[in-house]
Image (cartoon, rainbow, N blue to C red):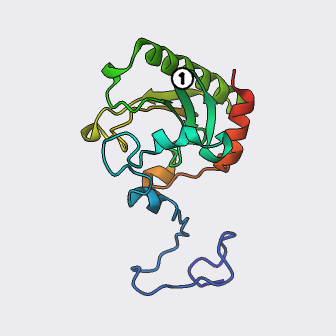
């Protein structure tokens, strides 16, 4: 134990200090290096054109488990977000590479709506979500990470799910592997 907080049950046997990281403090660190891939733009398309590295165009050609696709509809599919805000964070994506909601066909609008409803039902069945944030960011200026291929977010919410971790540490704790979440949701899809 170190002398900083000798009575803390969370204190490791020996705290390793790293030069250059600032003044040592009593906080333990939860490192999430996988987020760096998102920050650095991994899996982002190289242009707005279909097939130019667009993951939403590429995913449907892969097996569901590999692509984290939970369910396939006629005009759209539901897939887990690789960089989720909360456990069970899904996206409903039309197969067609289209950027703007107004460009969707009637069949695509209907399928996106139906899959969104089904996603909510499946997440409630698996994890008892208390509520949802549902929406899409239209254009980069509105926060769309991949603006060229429309996708609707279905983010489950629970009472108290925003605590000190995201508010202070800018870190989300996800208690389950994405492949396990995908399997549960696929099994529970209505």
**Residue under pointer 1:** 116
- At 50% from the left and 43% from the top, the residue drawn is 58
User: Picture coordinates of residue 109 (x, y %)?
Assistant: 44, 17
Q: Nearer the viewer, residue 124 or 52?
A: 52
Q: Measured along the vertical axis of the image, is residue 132 above or below residue 17?
A: above
Which part of the image, by quadrant, shows the N terminus? bottom right
In the image as oriented, which residue stretches furthest toward the left? 141
Badge 1: residue crowd in 10 Å (few <14, some 14–19, many ≥20)? many
User: Picture coordinates of residue 3 (x, y %)?
Assistant: 59, 84
Q: Measured along the vertical axis of the image, is residue 67 above or below residue 43?
A: above
Q: Nearer the viewer, residue 176 or 52?
A: 52
In the image as oriented, which residue stretches furthest toward the bottom? 19
User: Picture coordinates of residue 189 (x, y %)?
Assistant: 69, 25
Q: Nearer the viewer, residue 50 or 125?
A: 50
- At 34% from the left and 23% from the top, the residue drawn is 101
Q: Measured along the vertical axis of the image, is residue 52 above or below residue 106?
A: below
Which part of the image, by quadrant, shows the C terminus? top right
- At 33% from the left and 39% from the top, the residue drawn is 147
Q: Is residue 43 visible?
A: yes
């Amino acid at each position: 134990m170190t002398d900083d907080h000798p009575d803390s049950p969370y204190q490791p046997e020996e705290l390793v200090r790293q030069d250059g990281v600032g003044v040592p403090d009593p906080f333990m660190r939860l490192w999430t290096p996988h987020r760096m891939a998102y920050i650095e733009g991994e899996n982002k398309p190289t242009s707005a054109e279909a097939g130019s590295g667009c993951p939403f165009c590429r995913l449907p050609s892969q097996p569901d488990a590999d692509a984290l696709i939970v369910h396939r509809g006629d005009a759209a599919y539901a897939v887990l977000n690789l960089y989720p805000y909360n456990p069970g964070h899904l996206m409903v994506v039309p197969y067609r590479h289209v950027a703007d909601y107004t460009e969707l066909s009637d069949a695509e609008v209907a399928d996106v709506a139906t899959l969104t409803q089904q996603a909510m039902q499946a997440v409630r069945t698996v994890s008892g979500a208390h509520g949802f944030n549902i929406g899409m960011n239209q254009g980069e200026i509105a926060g769309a990470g991949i603006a060229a291929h429309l996708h609707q977010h279905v983010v489950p919410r629970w009472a108290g799910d925003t605590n000190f971790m995201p508010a202070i540490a800018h870190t989300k704790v996800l208690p389950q592997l994405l492949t396990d979440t995908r399997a549960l949701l696929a099994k529970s899809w209505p």
